[in-house]
Image (spheres, rainbow, N blue to C red):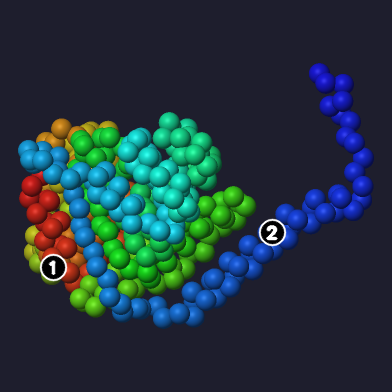
């Protein structure tokens, strides 16, 4: 044992006070900034109408043709960044995406990454760290940091079911929605800041979303939710109960009894319910899956036959409302994990794209 281990050099009183004063002041500044931000967000309109473009992307697993992968599409999107890239990533083993983030960093784009603790030691995360990109993680948290989103230049949002892995891009069925909307970007930026900054100081997050309801000029309505801070089950149940003709879903994991029962009740009322479950997840859920209960009740549900995972987390209501994001239909997603959920209403073109994906899956 080092003979000096119990000995500390005397510190001049002024220096000692200064060493404690600096971090204390930093915490005060952060708290004031957050308070101002919260007050600002609460005073802005809760509904905003704006212009906004969007795209919906799926990987082409099983289509048998040459096309652009989700990996390639994301890299193209990262190239447009001129100021900032914030990314909350459950997983990353894609070397091309890591290289694209490093290239952006080298071009003076401010890149920040927040990762799931279980995966942060993987090679590509460590590569980002080594390049000088700040990478933080959620620590030893009970739930998962399950997000898969990017905010670019505080204007563009990329989110969906796609984990940034080889399997995510080349083997699994995944979806992504890309939306050009500064208010939506503000919603996701706040979520990212809470993860990245507040976690560093062990502070709780603010459940208020700056723009909970956004209206695009084409009539598209976008509702934003973040679990576990927001109530996510109530809006999901509301959408299911609002169905007047059809409910279609693609579920990697579906174990939430309330959601399953709500769909069964709608089926009893004459609503057509059609769903696809990931076959392997159904097996691994050991009786918790809603599949058997729905099948027994007569709903039109089936297991996928894809080689990889059927990784979607999507519900389509009446061929015009789409629910998507990182959010599996489970209690963990509702109460423990960091998740994002979008409800996109009044856009039949977006709904049609998701219905085409449903019909394509084997």
Is residue 37 found left or right of 279 in the rendered image?
right
The residue depicted at 26 percent of the width and 43 percent of the height is 71
Residue 289 image position (x, y, % from top left): 25, 42
Dot placed on the residue nearer the N-terminal end, 1 or 2: 2
Is residue 293 found left or right of 125 in the rendered image?
left
Q: Nearer the viewer, residue 65 or 8?
A: 65
**Visible residue check, residue 302:** no
Q: Nearer the viewer, residue 223 or 292?
A: 223
To which residue does mark 2 refer?
Answer: 26
SS of the residue at dot 1? Answer: helix
Residue 114 image position (x, y, % from top left): 47, 47
Callout in the foreground (1, 2): 2
Q: Report the Cα–Cα distance between label 1 and label 2.
A: 48 Å
Is residue 149 found left or right of 312 in the rendered image?
right
Q: Quadrant of residue 84?
A: bottom left
The tag on residue 64 is none
The quarter in which the N terminus is drawn is top right
SS of the residue at dot 2? Answer: helix
Q: Quadrant of residue 280?
A: top left
Taking 142 as reference, is 326 above or below it? Answer: below
Q: Nearer the viewer, residue 127 or 88?
A: 127
The quarter in which the C terminus is drawn is top left
Residue 43 image position (x, y, % from top left): 49, 80
To which residue does mark 1 refer?
Answer: 348
Q: Nearer the viewer, residue 95 or 114?
A: 95
Residue 147 image position (x, y, % from top left): 38, 50
Report crowding for label 2: few under 14, some 14 to 19, many 20 or more residues within 10 A (C-alpha).
few
**Visible residue check, residue 9:** yes
Q: How many labels were placed on the picture? A: 2
Report crowding for label 1: few under 14, some 14 to 19, many 20 or more residues within 10 A (C-alpha).
some
């Amino acid at each position: 044992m080092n003979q000096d281990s119990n000995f500390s050099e005397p510190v001049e009183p002024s220096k000692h006070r200064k060493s404690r004063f600096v971090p204390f002041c930093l915490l005060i500044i952060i708290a004031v900034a957050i308070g101002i931000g919260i007050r600002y967000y609460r005073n802005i309109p809760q509904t905003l109408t704006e212009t906004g473009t969007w795209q919906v992307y799926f990987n082409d697993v099983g289509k048998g043709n040459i096309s652009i992968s989700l990996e390639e599409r994301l890299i193209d999107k990262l190239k447009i960044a001129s100021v900032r890239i914030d990314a909350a990533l459950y997983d990353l083993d894609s070397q091309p995406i890591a290289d694209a983030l490093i290239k952006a960093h080298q071009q003076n784009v401010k890149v920040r990454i927040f990762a799931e603790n279980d995966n942060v030691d993987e090679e590509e995360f460590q590569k980002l760290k080594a390049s000088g990109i700040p990478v933080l993680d959620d620590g030893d948290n009970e739930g998962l940091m399950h997000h898969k989103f990017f905010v670019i230049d505080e204007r563009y949002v990329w989110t969906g079911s796609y984990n940034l892995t080889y399997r995510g891009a080349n083997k699994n069925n995944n979806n992504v929605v890309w939306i050009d909307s500064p208010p939506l970007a503000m919603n996701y930026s706040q979520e990212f800041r809470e993860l990245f900054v507040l976690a560093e100081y062990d502070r709780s997050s603010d459940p208020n979303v700056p723009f909970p309801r956004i209206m695009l000029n084409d009539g598209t309505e976008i509702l934003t939710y973040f679990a576990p801070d927001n109530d996510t089950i109530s809006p999901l149940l509301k959408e299911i109960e609002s169905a007047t003709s059809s409910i279609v879903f693609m579920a990697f994991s579906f174990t939430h009894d309330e959601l399953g029962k709500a769909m069964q009740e709608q089926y009893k009322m004459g609503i057509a319910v059609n769903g696809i479950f990931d076959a392997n997840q159904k097996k691994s859920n050991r009786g918790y899956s809603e599949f058997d209960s729905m099948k027994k009740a007569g709903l039109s549900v089936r297991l996928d036959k894809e080689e990889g995972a059927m990784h979607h987390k999507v519900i389509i209501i009446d061929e015009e409302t789409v629910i998507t994001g990182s959010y599996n239909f489970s209690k963990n997603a509702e109460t423990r994990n960091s998740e994002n959920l979008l409800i996109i209403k009044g856009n039949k073109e977006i709904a049609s794209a998701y219905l085409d994906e449903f019909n394509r899956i084997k």
